[in-house]
């Protein structure tokens, strides 16, 4: 019999997972506490921007295999497998992850579990959480030991969410210690992911703690790689060297590799920054804080890039932002996303505004989220609109639209031809040839 799936939490991760699993032929019920979000999803309208996801969502709805609800009773009754996809944001004023949503979901679901099922955690959690949740389930589920928990971390990138879900690099299954339960969980997971496994995706089993750690250590490594090249950018700035050439030369070493070695304004988003902080907090609780003190430096290097960007812009304006106009291109934390969580671009824009600059921002997709997050900024209707009369233009998110801009066309509307390329995304020669004073992070 085909497994019936529920997906609890329908944000970037859950909505993508629900739609993709329906596309693979499973009957899927998505659940979220947010009624507005559920109404939009049920109408085939994505509450966020993710390239390629809306057609998959619509196909699922049209086929009748994908439905949405806000009812835990309905989910508990329906599901053979319950995927847990709720968010684990950073706690306000602390490094640790906020597990409110995870605990609330398990707290609501477990007491309603009257039939055998597998709960599959996908949220990014501090190591030790799965074991604790398994205990809660065992204690509160009426079906007792027939409700089994597995931990199956998710590695999807925004902007590539469908691709990463349907063709993941690897599948990691954190299994319970008890052998019968572990064998059952592994069998179900292999069945759910059989198309990917058949296509050659490595399937690894581990204990709960290792599976939880795979996710946070992967993000810690990626963050470290970005901060490494940005630290080299700082040295390049001091030594009048070019970090983009340096990065390219490093990338030809297979042991290093070129991906996530892009120097610039650094990382943001809903994952890397909060995940490395939660990882440090958890290591501290475990008495292993020394092992991760380097992540504090990774975080600080990353934040210093934003400060350096503001300093460079101020310097180009003769030392002050007062009465000066700044055109900001980009608000999302990266291109092909409308996500502004911990966005380096918005952070820089807000900081210049706070220092007295008149800042106008444009982003192809993230305008509504950016407005909500930073209502004191001005927003333009287009890239040219945002840089009109600007004394300096800042490229902060490397959308293709900005890479393709014609330097001579932009020159027509600005007050002064100053540009800082925060993502090393433009061709300096082209811009300089059109009379621009081109500056970039980590380059002479
Ligand atoms: C990340 C992980 O890649 C993914 O595996 C995990 O599941 C969730 O976190 P995401 O947050 O979508 O995914 O973004 P990602 O593409 O990893 O980029 C993160 C940030 O790093 C962005 O702000 C991006 O601009 C920055 N970045 C990336 C760089 O500054 N330089 C690079 O070379 C690469």
Image: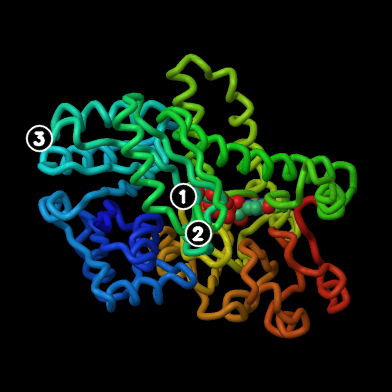
Residue at horizontal 17%, vertical 58%? 70
Expressed as whole percent of the image width and height from the top left, the position of residue 119 reads: 28, 42
Q: CA distance from mark 3 to mark 2?
A: 37 Å
Q: Is 437 displayed left or right of 100 in the figure?
A: right
How many residues crowd around disc 1 within 10 Å: few (fewer than 14), some, or many (20 or more)?
some
- The answer to whether the residue bearing label 2 lies less than 8 angstroms from the nearest atom of ligand 1 is yes
Residue 399, quarter of picture: bottom right
Q: Are marks 3 and 2 in contact (CB under 8 Å)?
A: no
Placement of 341 over or under 285, stated as above or below: below
Placement of 13 over or under 182, stated as above or below: below
Viewer-nearest of discs 3 and 2: 3
Determine if residue 423 is in view: yes
Expressed as whole percent of the image width and height from the top left, the position of residue 374 reads: 44, 59
* Sequence-first disc among 2 and 1: 2
Q: Residue furthest top?
A: 287
Q: Is 230 displayed left or right of 190 in the figure?
A: right
The disc label shown at residue 270, or none: 1
Residue at horizontal 26%, vertical 71%? 40
Viewer-nearest of discs 2 and 1: 2
How many residues crowd around disc 3 within 10 Å: few (fewer than 14), some, or many (20 or more)?
some
Q: Which residue is mark 3?
A: 142
* Sequence-first disc among 1 and 3: 3
Q: Which residue is mark 2?
A: 158
Determine if residue 443 is in view: no
Residue at horizontal 69%, vertical 67%? 392
Quadrant the N terminus occupies:
bottom left
Q: CA distance from mark 2 to mark 1?
A: 10 Å
Expressed as whole percent of the image width and height from the top left, the position of residue 103 reads: 25, 37
Q: CA distance from mark 1 to mark 3?
A: 35 Å
Q: Secondary structure at mark 1?
A: loop
- The answer to whether the residue bearing label 1 lies less than 8 angstroms from the nearest atom of ligand 1 is yes
Q: Secondary structure at mark 2?
A: loop
């Amino acid at each position: 019999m085909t497994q019936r799936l529920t997906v609890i939490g329908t944000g970037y991760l859950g909505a993508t997972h629900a739609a993709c699993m329906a596309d693979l032929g499973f009957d899927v019920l998505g659940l979220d506490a947010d009624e507005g979000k559920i109404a939009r999803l049920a109408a085939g309208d994505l509450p966020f921007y993710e390239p390629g996801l809306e057609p998959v969502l619509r196909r699922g709805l049209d086929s009748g295999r994908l439905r949405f609800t806000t009812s835990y009773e309905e989910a508990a009754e329906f599901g053979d497998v319950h995927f847990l996809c709720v968010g684990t944001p950073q706690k306000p004023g602390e490094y640790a992850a906020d597990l409110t949503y995870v605990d609330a979901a398990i707290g609501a679901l477990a007491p309603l579990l009257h039939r055998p099922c597998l709960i599959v955690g996908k949220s990014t959690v501090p190591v030790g959480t799965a074991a604790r949740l398994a205990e809660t389930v065992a204690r509160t589920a009426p079906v007792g030991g027939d409700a089994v928990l597995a931990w199956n971390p998710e590695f999807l990138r925004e902007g590539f969410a469908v691709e990463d879900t349907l063709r993941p690099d690897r599948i990691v299954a954190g299994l319970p210690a008890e052998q019968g339960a572990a064998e059952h969980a592994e069998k179900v997971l292999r069945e759910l992911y059989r198309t990917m496994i058949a296509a050659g995706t490595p399937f690894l089993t581990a204990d709960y703690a290792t599976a939880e750690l795979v996710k946070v250590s992967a993000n810690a490594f990626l963050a470290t790689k970005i901060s490494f090249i940005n630290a080299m950018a700082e040295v390049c700035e001091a030594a009048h060297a070019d970090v983009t050439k340096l990065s390219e030369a490093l990338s030809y070493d297979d042991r290093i590799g070129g991906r996530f070695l892009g120097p610039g304004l650094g990382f943001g988003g809903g994952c890397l920054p909060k995940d490395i902080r939660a990882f440090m907090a958890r290591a501290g609780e475990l008495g292993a804080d020394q092992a991760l003190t380097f992540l504090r430096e990774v975080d600080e290097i990353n934040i210093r890039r934003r400060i350096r960007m503001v300093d460079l812009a101020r310097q180009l304006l003769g030392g002050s932002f007062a009465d000066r106009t700044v055109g900001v291109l980009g608000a999302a934390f990266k291109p092909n996303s409308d996500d502004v969580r911990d966005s380096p671009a918005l952070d820089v824009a807000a900081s210049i505004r706070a220092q007295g600059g008149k800042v106008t921002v444009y982003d192809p997709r993230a305008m509504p989220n950016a407005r909500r997050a930073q209502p004191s900024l001005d927003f333009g209707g287009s890239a040219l609109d945002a840089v009109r009369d600007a004394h300096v233009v800042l490229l902060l998110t490397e959308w293709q639209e900005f890479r393709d801009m014609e330097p001579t066309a932009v020159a027509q509307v600005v007050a002064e031809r100053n540009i800082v390329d925060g993502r090393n995304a433009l061709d300096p020669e082209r811009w300089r040839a059109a009379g621009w004073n081109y500056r970039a992070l980590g380059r002479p």
